């Protein structure tokens, strides 16, 4: 462990100075960053950290994001295969995430690069604060720990299959070579695979194939892409002709049994902090600006819940009470809405006049935020009514796929889901919440509304710019 004690203490002091952070929570993080085991400071899952220390999940996320802002942690975006848990790429910036697909070398499949569950947000100790020292190629455990998500747990049969099928890892230093003898069996599949260079050499079996193979290792990958080999003993020679070490494993197995293993003994993904959760986190949006992100960034979400509001009667309020009183009320109303969004794990995307757009990971959170907004507005309106004035909040909720874009120096959303959500809000009258079926039928939403005393009915409405009619649920107290 190489800890820069002076820099660590300086940045830790800055973190302790952040208003609202719990000192004991900071102590837990400080202890982790000083743990003698370097692996514990690498690619930390804040959700697991919260469970370990009994922290509220939102408090742990705030702690890690503030620590990243203070320079104690580095934030990375990891592309994760949902089948094997492999981290195919570790990216420094959100706009480095591919717009469409990425390839899993282990599973040999192309995967959609959706932010919902394919992009893991990990935190490692900042390299200037502590230099992590571990040998990725020391043994199979170290190799798997580096190249696979710690949130992925293999079933015992699948792990045994991998152990039996894999030899290595091996590391080839520049200017050196590694020689192996491979016993090639008919009916098996063989390859050399380098996860660090994201490349492989396939070894298909044919009569008359080679019994001696030379593979070249370069920083760009292994080559050639394929070499036919003969059944029996095959001599492998891997030569590093580059300027940096290259690691690889040799895989050989009867893959026909893999489907039965995975079907009968599925692997497990434990909860991890996803890119979608990050985007819908208000602390992240407050702390990290987007000026450095590519203006042409287009990333995909499979599911996003959007909440739109509007304040009815605000224009008349300016006429009747004057600019200062009306402006103060509108600002107070924004504070009520923003606090409700943050308390229910959402993020304020933008304000538009007297309206807001907010985003959530789950429809239930959005519904609870809408209810809290209505309660908060009751308190605000009580004072206005005493003065002979009144306003009303209108809320619309919708869920669906969306694109993540940059707009006016902020992270924004684009697509038909956004259009529908805005139009649904336009259907609401003052004091009403209008929801589409995707929200209303989500687990917990209907019960939450009924328990809070909200009821109403289903109807078909025409939304501007949306073909046909749209089912909505109009709720009131």
Image (cartoon, helix red, strand yellow):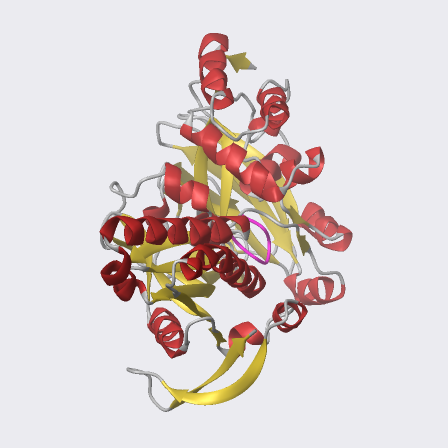
Query: Residue 338's spot in the image, x, y percent?
Result: 43, 50
Nearest the camera: 407 or 436? Answer: 436
The magenta-colored residue range is: 80-86
- 444 with respect to 296 (left or right): right
- 449 with respect to 318 (left or right): right
Q: Magenta stretch containing residue 81, yes or no?
A: yes
Query: Residue 470's spot in the image, x, y percent?
Result: 42, 86
Query: Residue 288's spot in the image, x, y percent?
Result: 36, 38
- Magenta stretch: dominant secondary structure: loop
Number of on-image labels: 0
Q: Is residue 412 above or below residue 5?
A: below
Q: Quadrant of the N terminus?
A: top right
For image coordinates 64% across by 69% down, the residue present is 443
Q: Magenta stretch containing residue 361, yes or no?
A: no
Q: Single out the residue that lies furthest toward the top.
A: 6
Q: Quadrant of the C terminus?
A: bottom right
- 402 with respect to 53 (left or right): left
Q: Is residue 225 above or below residue 72?
A: below
Q: Is residue 412 visible?
A: yes
Nearest the camera: 27 or 244? Answer: 27
Q: Is residue 150 visible?
A: no
For image coordinates 40% across by 39% down, the residue present is 216
């Amino acid at each position: 462990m190489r800890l820069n004690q002076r820099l660590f203490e300086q940045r830790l002091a800055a973190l302790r100075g952040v208003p609202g952070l719990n000192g004991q929570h900071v102590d837990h993080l400080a202890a982790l960053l000083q743990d003698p085991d370097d692996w514990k400071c690498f690619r930390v899952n804040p959700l697991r950290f919260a469970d370990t220390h009994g922290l509220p999940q939102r408090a742990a996320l705030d702690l890690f994001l503030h620590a990243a802002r203070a320079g104690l942690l580095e934030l990375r975006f990891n592309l994760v295969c949902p089948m094997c848990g492999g981290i195919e790429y570790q990216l420094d910036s959100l706009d480095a995430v591919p717009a469409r697909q990425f390839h899993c070398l282990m599973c040999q499949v192309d995967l959609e690069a959706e932010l919902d569950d394919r992009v893991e947000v990990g935190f490692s100790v900042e390299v200037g604060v502590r230099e992590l020292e571990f040998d990725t190629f020391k043994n199979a455990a170290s190799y798997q720990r580096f190249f696979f998500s710690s949130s992925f747990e293999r079933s015992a049969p699948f792990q045994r299959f991998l152990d039996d099928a894999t030899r290595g890892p091996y590391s080839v230093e520049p200017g050196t070579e590694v020689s192996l003898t491979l016993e090639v069996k008919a009916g098996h599949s063989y390859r050399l695979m380098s996860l660090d260079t994201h490349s492989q050499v396939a070894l298909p079996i044919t009569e008359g194939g080679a019994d001696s193979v030379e593979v070249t290792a370069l920083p760009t990958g292994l080559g050639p892409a394929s070499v036919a080999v003969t059944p029996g003993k095959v001599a492998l020679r891997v030569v590093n002709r580059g300027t940096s070490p290259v690691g690889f494993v040799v895989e050989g197995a009867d893959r026909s049994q893999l489907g039965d293993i995975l079907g009968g003994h599925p692997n497990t993904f434990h909860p991890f902090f996803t890119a979608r959760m990050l985007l819908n986190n208000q602390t992240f949006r407050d702390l990290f600006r987007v000026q450095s992100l590519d203006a042409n960034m287009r990333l995909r979400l499979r599911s996003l819940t959007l909440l739109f509001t509007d304040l009815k009667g605000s224009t008349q309020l300016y006429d009747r009470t004057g600019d200062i009183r009306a402006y103060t009320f509108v600002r107070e109303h924004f504070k009520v809405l923003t606090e409700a969004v943050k308390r229910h794990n959402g993020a304020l995307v933008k304000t538009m006049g007297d309206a807001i757009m907010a985003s959530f990971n789950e429809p239930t959170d959005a519904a609870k935020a809408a209810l809290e907004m209505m309660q908060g507005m009751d308190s605000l309106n009580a004072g206005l009514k005493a003065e002979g004035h009144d306003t009303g909040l209108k809320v619309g909720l919708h869920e669906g796929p969306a694109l993540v874009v940059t707009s006016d120096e902020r992270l924004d959303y684009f697509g038909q889901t956004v259009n529908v959500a805005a139009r649904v809000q336009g259907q609401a009258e003052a004091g009403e919440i209008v929801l589409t079926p995707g929200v209303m039928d989500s687990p917990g939403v209907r019960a939450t509304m009924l328990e809070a005393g909200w009821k109403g009915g289903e109807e078909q409405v025409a939304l501007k710019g949306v073909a046909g009619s749209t089912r909505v649920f109009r709720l009131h107290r």
